[in-house]
Image (spheres, helix red, strand yellow):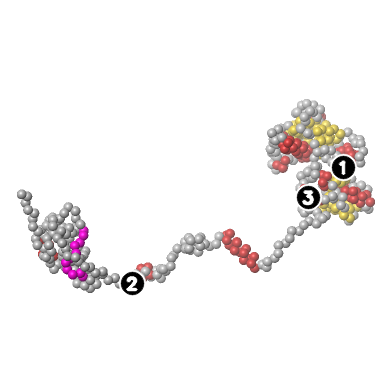
Amino acid sequence: QPPAPPQLAAAPFGAPPAAALPPAQSNALVPSAAPPSADPFGVFGAAPVGAGQSALGAPPVVQGGFPELQQQQQGAPFGAGQSAVGAPPAVQGGFPDESPFGAGPPSVAPSMPSAAPVPQQHYQQAPPQPQQPAASDPWSDMGFGPPASSEPLGPTPGENDDLFNVGLAPTRAEAEAAAAETAQSKKPSAAKEPKVKRQKGELPPGGEWYDAKIFTPTLGVMFFKPKELTDSLFLQTDKKLVDALEDRPVVAFIVEGSSARSAGVELGHVLLKVNGIDVKNPKEASRLIKEGPRPLPLLFYVPDTKVVVAEGEHMVKYNTKETGAPNSAKDWKPKYVVIGGIIAQPWMMNMYRSKSEYDIAVIETQARRPVSVKVKQFSLQGARIQNDWQGPQMVKYKNKLHPWKYIVILPISRNPIKIASPNLGQLKPCHEGIRRVLNAQQRDRGRKNPHDATPVQRDPYSGGGYDTRNNRRGGY
C-alpha cells in the first residue's frame, strides 16, 4: 500500500483543513464565515483587518512546515511576510528563515479552497467614496502663471489657417486687398465712364502734325486714297487705322527735286489742310493747291505706322544664265528698281534707267497717256530667291572700296536676276519687297493645296528684313 498522505496541522482560525494543492493554482479568494463587514478594507474607520486574515475574512492557506511563521501570524502587525490586503502569502515548500534582505518568504498565489461546502455569504455594497478635490495646477503653485483654462487650446479648424493660434500677420496680398478696400470705401461711388466713340473725321491717335509752305505753282506730289495703298505703302498698316483715315489724301508719289521734297514731305503723309481749309479727298486737295495763294501754307499728318517702300537705285545683271556675281564691276548695269508700286501689279518688278524716268512713267500713266520711257519688266510669280536663308551674298572688286551685297532671283522661265548695292541699307527695301511677294504666293498655294505648298523658310533676320542690331553681316 502506498503511504498515506501527511496530515496537515489544524488551522488556528478553525477553518476546515485545505486539500492538497492541485497542479493548477487559482487566485480566487474564499469568503469568510464571519458576518459581512461594511468596511472590508478598513479605509473608513472600521476595525482593521487582523494579521493573517484576508480582505474577505478567510485565512490564508499555508502548506509546508513554517512553525515560526504560524506563530507570528497571531497578533502580528502588518509587516514583512504579509500581502497588500493583510493576508500572508501562501507558499509551497521550505524556505530559509530569513531573506538576505530582511524580507519574508516570497509571495505566491493562495491555494485552491477545499471542496467542503461553504455557507452562503451576503455582501453589502460599499458606500461611494467622497470626491477628492481637484488637484491644483503644479505650474501655478510654483509661480509660473495662472492655472490653465478649461477651454480647448487648439484653434478652430479652418479659422484663418492659424494652426498654432499665434496670430499670423497678414500676407502682402491680403494687406494690399485690405488697403484697396478701405480706400474704395472712402471714395464716393462714381458711375463708370462710358466708352467714347470716335467722331467722324477724327484722326487715329499716335500720329504727329507739321506745317509746310510751298512757293512754286505745283507741289510735285501725287495723292491717293488710303484704301488704294493697302497693297503698297500701307501693306503693313492696321485696317482700323486705314479706315479711320477715311478718304483723306495720302502722298503716294513724290517727284524728285520738287518743292514737296524740299519741304520735308515723305511718302505716306496725309494732307489735312490747305491754306487753313480742311480737305477730305485727293481731288479737293489738288484743286485747292492749284487755286491757293503763294506761299501756300499746308498742314500734314504723319500716321503711326510703317510705310512700305520697295524701290531704289541698284546695280543689276539679268542677261546671263550664271547665278554668281560677274567678274568685273563694269558688267553690272545701274537701274531704278520698283517692286509693284502705284502703277504696276504687286508681283511685277519694273526697272527704269533712273528715278527721273520712273517719275515720267508715273505722271504719264496717271494722265492716261502712253509711257514714253524705257522700262524692263519681270514677273515674280513662281520665282524664288537663291539661298535666301543665308541673307545677301557678297562680292569684292579691286576698284571698289567696300564689297557689294547682292541677291539672286530665280524666275521660272528666264535667266537669273542679280540685284546688288554697295551697302545693305540700299538693298533692304527691294529685298524685303521681293520677299513679301514670294511669301504671299506660298501662302496662297498652301491654302489651295497644302500638300504641294513649299514651306516658308525661317527668316534669319528680325522683322522679315535686316536689322543692324542682330545681323552679324552688318545689317541694314
The numbered mark, 2 or 1, whose residue comes first in the sequence reads 2
How far across and how far down the image is residue 168, in percent?
51, 62
**Local SS, label 2:** loop
Using the image, tell me which numbered label, if any, was put on residue 256: 1
Name which residue type carries label 2: Pro
The numbered mark, 1 or 3, whose residue comes first in the sequence reads 3
> Marks 3 and 2: CB-CB under 8 Å?
no
Tell me the residue at 34%/69% (across/down): 135
Using the image, tell me which numbered label, if any, was put on residue 335: none
- The Cα–Cα distance between marks 2 and 1, rounded to whole angstroms, is 115 Å
- Residue underneath mark 3: 241
Decide which of 90, 140 is in the foreground and name it.
90
Name which residue type carries label 3: Leu
What secondary structure is the stretch in magenta mostly built from?
Answer: loop
Decide which of 201, 51 is in the foreground and name it.
51
Q: Which residues are magenta?
A: 27-37
The answer to whether residue 220 shows anywhere in this view is yes
Q: 254 above or below 144?
A: above
- Residue underneath mark 2: 133
How far across and how far down the image is residue 262, in percent?
87, 47
Tell me the residue at 82%/38% (across/down): 345
Name which residue type carries label 1: Glu
Report if residue 36 lies within the magenta region.
Answer: yes
